[in-house]
Image: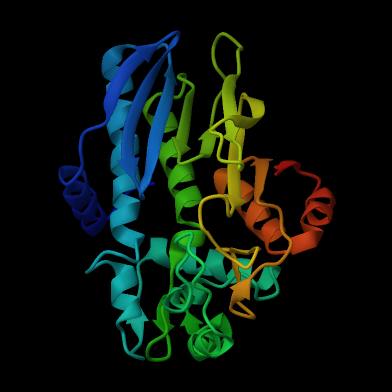
């Protein structure tokens, strides 16, 4: 994917603000590590000259930092900040943002409204910090008035939202970043297999030359730091959605951070984690998220999609 002058400037600024990725040889491959999107990231690179491995590592990190700088709701001045502070005025967005908005709208449709990028404003009522501070129904209802993609006027490339409405790409951003980064790695070295892993969401574009798979462990939700599942990944992508790290607990009731945008309340009786194998990380994340939003019907949904999955 080619970048505009503005995107290159964002990428350059983000890269300068971050610590350079580390690169080390481990057993039979290179391991590059860095931090982006508030999570540990790594690139596993099969045997290749160090210069090639370093170029891949730096390019993947720059991609992650650019997407974070462009779409994090916590940063001032990016497109999300401008949209969220547009105060009801129309705003023309770039092609990449338009594509993300189109994809988000499609997820809203597929989920029957349970997934909605305007639901991020619910964080004003919900703070998933492991405490027992559950908001009142009145507090949730007051914020929920600002939720609903159907209230948004979207005529590509012009977006208009009601004053005080907000968008949040957090539900799709990491998977999109993985797919973008693995594409960059493949374009730099088509014959070198690379596994891009951003906080447990990962993808591999090409098989290793020795035929061996990348060995992947899916972290358990029980807090023991063990692997709940071990997966042999040759090509494809894995994405996980769950509430193992972010939740509230009150009177013995666990409140997941996965909110149903239609009600403003956590999804009930869903698995703690859903991991899906698909061709791309975006596809895997879509299936995992839609399954989680089905609650008790999560596994039935996944069976209907005929995808490989793991539940916890």
User: Is 88 on the left or on the right of 172, as rendered?
Assistant: left
> Quick one: 168 or 142, which is closer to the camera?
142
User: Is 195 on the left or on the right of 111, as rendered?
Assistant: left
Q: Which quarter of the figure has residue 269? A: bottom right
> Quick one: 184 or 124, which is closer to the camera?
124
User: Is 17 on the left or on the right of 232, as rendered?
Assistant: left
Q: Residue at x 43, y 68 (%)?
A: 168
Q: Is residue 278 above or below residue 241?
A: above
Q: Which quarter of the figure has residue 294? A: bottom right
Q: Residue at x 58, y 44 (%)?
A: 239
| x and y percentages locating residue 295 in the rendered image | 74, 62
Quarter of the picture containing the C terminus is top right
> Quick one: 147 or 211, which is closer to the camera?
147
| x and y percentages locating residue 249 in the rendered image | 57, 63
Report the number of discs: 0
Q: Is residue 254 above or below residue 126?
A: above
Q: Residue at x 29, y 14 (%)?
A: 50
| x and y percentages locating residue 308 in the rendered image | 75, 39
> Quick one: 21 or 221, which is closer to the camera?
221
């Amino acid at each position: 994917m080619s970048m505009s002058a503005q995107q290159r400037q964002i990428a350059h600024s983000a890269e300068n603000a971050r610590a350079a990725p580390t690169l080390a040889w481990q057993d039979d491959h290179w391991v590059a590590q860095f931090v982006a999107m508030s999570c540990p990231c790594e690139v596993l690179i099969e045997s290749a000259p160090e210069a090639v491995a370093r170029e891949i590592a730096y390019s993947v990190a720059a991609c992650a930092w650019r997407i974070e700088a462009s779409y994090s709701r916590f940063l001032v001045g990016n497109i999300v900040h401008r949209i969220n502070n547009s105060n009801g005025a129309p705003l023309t967005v770039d092609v990449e943002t338009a594509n993300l908005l189109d994809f988000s709208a499609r997820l809203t449709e597929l989920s029957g409204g349970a997934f909605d990028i305007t639901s991020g404003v619910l964080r004003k009522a919900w703070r998933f910090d492991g405490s027992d501070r559950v908001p009142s129904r009145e507090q949730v209802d007051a914020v929920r008035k600002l939720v609903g993609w159907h209230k948004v006027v979207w005529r590509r490339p012009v977006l208009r939202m009601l004053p005080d409405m907000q968008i949040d790409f957090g539900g799709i951003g990491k998977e999109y970043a993985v797919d973008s980064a693995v594409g960059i790695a493949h374009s730099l070295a088509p014959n070198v297999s690379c596994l891009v892993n951003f906080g447990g969401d990962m993808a591999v574009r090409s098989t290793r030359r020795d035929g061996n798979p990348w060995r992947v462990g899916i972290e358990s939700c029980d807090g023991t730091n063990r692997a709940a599942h071990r997966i042999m990944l040759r090509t494809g992508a894995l994405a996980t959605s769950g509430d193992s790290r972010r939740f509230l607990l009150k009177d013995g009731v666990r409140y997941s951070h996965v909110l149903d945008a239609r009600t403003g309340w956590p999804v009930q009786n869903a698995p703690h984690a859903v991991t899906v194998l698909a061709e791309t990380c975006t596809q895997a994340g879509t299936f995992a998220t839609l399954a989680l939003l089905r609650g008790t019907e999560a596994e039935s949904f996944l069976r209907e999609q005929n995808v490989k999955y793991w539940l916890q």
